[in-house]
Image: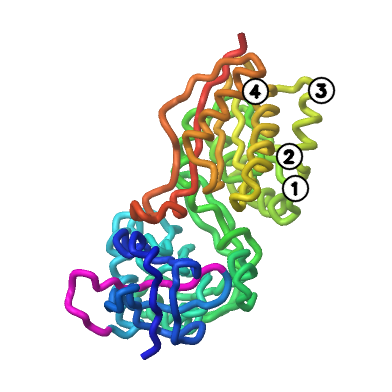
Amino acid sequence: MPKVYLSREAERLIKDRVYTIYSKWIGSVDAKPGDWVEIYNWRGKLIGLGFYEGIGAIGLRVLRYCLDEEEEYFEPEYLLENYIIRALKRRLKIVDEWDSYRLINADGDLIPGLIVDVYRDIAVIQSSSIGIDKYLTWISEFIVKEGIADRVYIRNDHRGRREAGLPIYKEWLIGNGDTRVKIREDEASFYVDVCNGQKTGFFLDQRLNRLTVKKFAFGSVLDLFCYTGGFGIHCALSDAEFVVLVDESGYAVYEAKNNVYENNVCGKVSIIQSKVEYFLDKMLREEVSFDVIICDPPAFIQSREYYEKGLSSYKRLYSSVMKIVSNGGLIFASSCSYFLDKDTFKSLLSNIAHEIGVEIVFLGDVYGLPPDHVYRPSDRELNYLKAYLFRVEKL
């Protein structure tokens, strides 16, 4: 059987049972990219099983550690089946109450390199592993056999695959038909296009935050980087008097219009296609203010080398947002940049407020991921989302 030997420096990763191991921690290899391999530590002791990647920055996807157990061989199908069943059991209450959720969250569900989101009868799969790629048909058939979904769509067109040099494609693997499905989120309905939408079609990670923000909605609401209108439509269905949705994507604006009609809030919602920066500049010039502002931008810090540049982008954005919120208004400020930790983000918001001469009062602590986005303590990169809800009082 093919073998991979880890370097001495990888002992800490083994101790913490890290499931995604970078190439720099690999000592020697007797395997081809995508092989199912035995994994040994630097002393030559068998410590696990997994897929050797061998392309891009990722060297190894561990699927099983055998540090304290007897050394036993398992086929990948056996492990994948058990992990999918375990993931479903972790979400039993969620599956009963939500018609859209994350079923597999990569390392958090012990299948590194795999994401599976469910939208009613459609399961959407994303792989960033050459090893997992070989089992996508098997995974899809198992999901259908277990009654989790009726159809399976592959969205292998994301940035991680491009960076690793993996083939880019999207297609039906099981089933066919319309890639667009309507989901329900509390009182709101949203159309999700699993082929053309961002991520797997929708931002499932902000689900509970959308439901929280709508409870505080009042007066005029501005939803920046609104995508298909998730936050804003919830607010329109709550106590907002009117809502402005802003996004530069033609697809997002098109689908936001459909969602506005679907939720019967046409008279309360205005949709503007524009770069957020241009829109904010216009609001500043015209001295327009809003009572509630939701700001959920894309990740400005994609890697450590862009940290300072990304930090400056966040500072410019949230400085403008704080300037156009009304006195006593609320801001929901979000960041999905893993490299910006929650404490630094909070300090950044506080420093901006001090510089522009306003006081902010935080409503609760950090708002983050919903319970279907599971992660272990060692899966730090999976805990990327952080947001703060705060009141702005102008001195």
* Sequence-first disc among 4 and 2: 2
Q: Does 311 sit above or below residue 292?
A: below
Question: What span is colored magenta in the figure?
Answer: 57-73
Mark 1 crowdedness (10 Å alpha carbons): few <14, some 14-19, many ≥20: some
> SS for tag 1?
loop
Residues marked 2 and 1 touching at CB (< 8 Å): yes
The N terminus, quarter of image: bottom left
Of residues 10 and 194, which is closer to you in this image?
10
> SS for tag 2?
helix
Q: Which residue is mark 4?
A: 325
Mark nearer the viewer, 2 or 3 = 2
* Marks 2 and 1, how far apart at CA: 7 Å
Location of residue 357 (image quadrant): top right
Give, as a three-letter code, the residue at label 1.
Glu
Q: Residue at x 49, y 48 (%)?
A: 384
- Report if residue 266 is visible in the image: no
Q: Which residue is mark 1?
A: 248
Colouring scheme, one of rainbow, by chain, secondary structure, one colour: rainbow
Q: Count the numbered circles shown.
A: 4
Q: Which residue is mark 2?
A: 276
* Sequence-first disc among 2 and 1: 1
Residue 286's label in the rendered image is 3
* Sequence-first disc among 3 and 1: 1
